[in-house]
């Protein structure tokens, strides 16, 4: 059994050492970044990414990242593209993942090329912007308008107040009946609509107060991820499992090593899974089961061939 585990470890190491080098010139052509705007609590971006490097199983892994000038990470999301496939991520007012009252302007949006173990290789595209709320309100009042060509035009049916969010606080602002505005999102109940009236953020109004004709159903709820189009349904694994484990409970499998990552599957009590490695703190292990691969809390498993401390560190 031990010899079998050592052979698996050796195979995994050979896979990493023998991986084809990244062609940085090609990777630099994988991104078209059309625009980026940052505010105090949100950012907006229009970016297309093409899969160019076969990291594994025809997937090219990369990372979207927003950082401030003190290198504080405000937002981070890993994704992947099928090689040869181009898809667009277009979001308005995506919230940061952390509180940014102490953020330092300017703000950077980066696309980072990753290897097959999700380790950063290089920043292949970057755009920098001053955040209006950090450098003086009104400095970039028209920047967001450049990112709104996909919005839906509507005409106000009544004078109405503006709100910070659905059922949120009313702003000391209103818009007049008969004016035309661009709408971007609706809430899931479709009772509130997000429109652009200027500045670097959207505002919300009651949906009953604006008319889009028959096109209202084209509006969707705000996205929960920057890039839902090509998110892999399971994590790209290193290729060779180095151990196996038995689930001590029914356990969640997540997109990344942490409870803040989306759940992509569940492993039933007493099921056996393939194990590929662990995080540096040994709290999470990368597993696969019935075609689903992802991260799971190590405390819910009994490792079989290789002890937890001897698994390769992947994150």
Image (cartoon, rainbow, N blue to C red):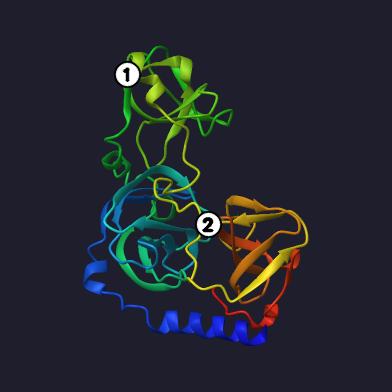
Look at the image and tell me whether residue 128 can be seen: yes
Between residue 192 and residue 144, name the one nearer to us.
192
Residue at the spot 53% in from the left edge and 33% down from the top edge: 165
Percent position (x, y) of residue 305? 68, 78
The quarter of the picture where residue 177 lies is top left
Question: Relative to 14, is 186 above or below?
Answer: above
Question: Left or right: where does residue 169 sit relative to residue 54?
Answer: right
Which quadrant of the figure contains the N terminus? bottom right
Look at the image and tell me whether residue 106 can be seen: no
Between residue 269 and residue 210, name the one nearer to us.
269
In three-dimensional space, the C-alpha distance between marks 2 and 1, rounded to whole angstroms, equals 34 Å
Question: Left or right: where does residue 182 sit relative to residue 116?
Answer: left
Location of mark 2 (residue): 100
Residue at the spot 38% in from the left edge and 17% down from the top edge: 176
Dot 1: element: loop
Percent position (x, y) of residue 111? 35, 62
Which quadrant of the figure contains the C terminus? bottom right
Q: Residues within 10 Å of mark 1 (few under 14, many from 20)?
A: few
Between residue 202 and residue 120, name the one nearer to us.
120
Percent position (x, y) of residue 69? 41, 67
Q: How crowded is mark 2: few (under 14 residues within 10 Å), some or many (20 or more)?
A: some
């Amino acid at each position: 059994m031990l010899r079998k585990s050592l052979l698996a470890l050796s195979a995994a190491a050979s896979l990493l050492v023998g991986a084809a080098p990244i062609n940085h010139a090609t990777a630099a052509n994988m991104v078209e970044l059309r625009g980026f705007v940052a505010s105090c609590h949100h950012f907006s971006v229009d970016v297309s990414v093409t899969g160019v490097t076969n990291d594994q199983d025809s997937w090219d892994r990369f990372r979207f990242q927003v950082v401030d000038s003190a290198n504080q990470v405000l937002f981070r999301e890993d994704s992947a593209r099928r090689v040869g496939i181009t898809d667009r991520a277009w979001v308005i007012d995506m919230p940061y993942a952390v509180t940014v009252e102490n953020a330092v302007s300017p703000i950077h949006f980066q696309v980072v090329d990753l290897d097959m173990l999700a380790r950063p290789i290089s920043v292949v595209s970057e755009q920098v912007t001053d955040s209006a709320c950090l450098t003086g309100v009104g400095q970039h009042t028209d920047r967001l308008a450049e990112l709104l060509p996909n919005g839906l035009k509507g005409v106000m049916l009544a004078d109405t107040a503006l709100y910070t969010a659905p059922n949120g606080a009313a702003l000391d602002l209103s818009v007049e009946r008969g004016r035309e505005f661009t709408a971007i999102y609706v809430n899931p109940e479709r009772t509130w609509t997000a429109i652009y009236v200027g500045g670097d953020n959207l505002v919300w109004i009651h949906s009953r107060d604006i008319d889009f004709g028959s096109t209202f159903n084209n509006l969707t709820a705000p996205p929960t991820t920057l890039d839902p189009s090509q998110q892999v349904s399971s994590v790209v694994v290193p290729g060779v499992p180095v151990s196996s484990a038995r689930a001590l409970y029914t356990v969640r499998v997540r997109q990344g090593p942490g409870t803040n990552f989306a759940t992509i599957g569940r492993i039933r009590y007493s099921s056996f899974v393939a194990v590929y490695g662990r995080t540096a703190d040994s709290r999470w292990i990368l597993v696969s089961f019935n075609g689903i691969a992802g991260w799971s809390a190590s405390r819910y498993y009994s490792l079989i061939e290789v002890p937890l401390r001897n698994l390769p560190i992947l994150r």
